DNA sequence: TCTAATTCCGCAAGATTTCCGAAATTCCTG
DNA sequence: CAGGAATTTCGGAAATCTTGCGGAATTAGA
């Protein structure tokens, strides 16, 4: 975890917002030379601080109208490996977290309709041998959804 | 929701992975002219299909070592407005969803330490008048975390 | 099948990024 | 706190990339 100075921090904030600004625009906003901006970005990428540059798709624009969080549990520890394999391979699963509490895992899933969700639950989750319980929380609306963090 | 052809789909998949590839690289991978790639991207942005281009920061690289999901509930409907205001203003909150089930809202929160989490809970959430219960699920490990969707 | 509209293409012009050496700054070490 | 090494910054030139355009090709509708 290298130390960040104020230029790095500003740069990271700006690039989280929009990574396609010309270096000249960033240079002007931050107040350092264009070539310095270039050096900094390269360094932030090399150091792993910036892990990638990604276009974000509006989910509803491509028919992904349903967002759900699914909690899953089992008691036999052998279930985990197969479960994770399935989950990693499924494009419906955006996130998969091992969590504390009554459940083993929390999934964030995006599909088109409730029908797709049903199919996902039966074909991808419940079909894993040993999965005992699931609880699905349907998202009614989303107030905030970002990857931008304070730096 | 405009119709997407196969070129659009490939392009969206590639740009979700990495939006900083030169148009020439995309042109080669997809097999259409550079200027066509340019036209397509412009169109996808104008149509709202692509909602932005964002640098992604590795959270642990900037000291955000703790990821938690927090479920919140209240009974007085007047609580919601104040709650959402707080949540939108807090940089610790990455996501905020109105969900079905026993709880009102689900938050995704990233902070540095358990101490920061404690502060967040007391200062940002519990201090909202009318908030009755919360349940916090700490993430032990994350197997998958993406914004890429199938298109 | 024909026409109109749209999309695709290559190329040239314009813009942006990258690379460089020199100056400035920062960071050790004594 | 001074000196020297290492790193960082900078402007500008060179290389690369994006953009805009007209004409060809393709698609869609009548």
Image: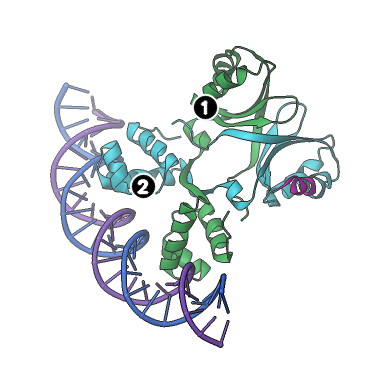
Chain colours: A cyan, B green, C purple, D blue
Stretch in magenta: A113-119
Res. B22 image quadrant: bottom left
Q: Which residue appears at 26% of the width and 37% of the height?
A: A31
Residue at image location 71% in from the left, 24% down from the top: B103
> Are dots 1 and 2 on a single chain?
no
Q: Report whether B31 appears left or right of A117.
A: left
Residue D20, given in percent of the width and then of the height, sits at 32, 63
Viewer-proximal residue among D2 and D23: D23
Image quadrant for the C terminus of chain B?
Answer: bottom right
The residue beneath circle 1 is: B88
Please say if B83 is above or below B139. above
Q: Quadrant of residue C27?
A: top left
* Chain hosting mark 1: B
Give the label on residue B134, or none.
Answer: none
Q: Which mark is residue A21?
A: 2
Whether the magenta-drawn stretch holds residue A35 is answered as no
Q: Which is nearer the eye, B80 or B54?
A: B80
In terms of secondary structure, where does tag 1 sit?
helix
| Rendered location of residue A44, percent (x, y) | 41, 42
Residue B141 seen: yes
Residue density around tag 1, few if under 14, some if 14–19, many if 20 or more, within 10 Å? some
Residue A116 among those drawn in magenta: yes
């Amino acid at each position: 975890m290298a130390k960040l100075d104020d230029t790095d921090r500003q740069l990271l904030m700006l690039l989280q917002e929009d990574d396609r600004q010309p270096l000249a625009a960033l240079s002007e906003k931050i107040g350092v030379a264009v070539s310095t901006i270039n050096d900094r970005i390269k360094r932030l990428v090399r150091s792993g601080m910036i892990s990638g540059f990604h276009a974000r798709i509006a989910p509803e624009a491509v028919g992904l109208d349903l967002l759900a969080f699914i909690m899953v549990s089992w008691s036999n520890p052998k279930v985990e490996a197969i479960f994770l394999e399935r989950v990693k391979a499924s494009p419906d699963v955006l996130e998969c977290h091992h969590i504390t509490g009554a459940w083993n895992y929390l999934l964030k899933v995006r599909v088109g309709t409730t029908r797709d969700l049903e199919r996902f639950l039966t074909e991808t989750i419940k079909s894993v041998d040993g999965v005992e319980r699931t609880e699905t929380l349907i998202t009614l609306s989303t107030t905030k959804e970002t990857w931008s963090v304070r730096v």
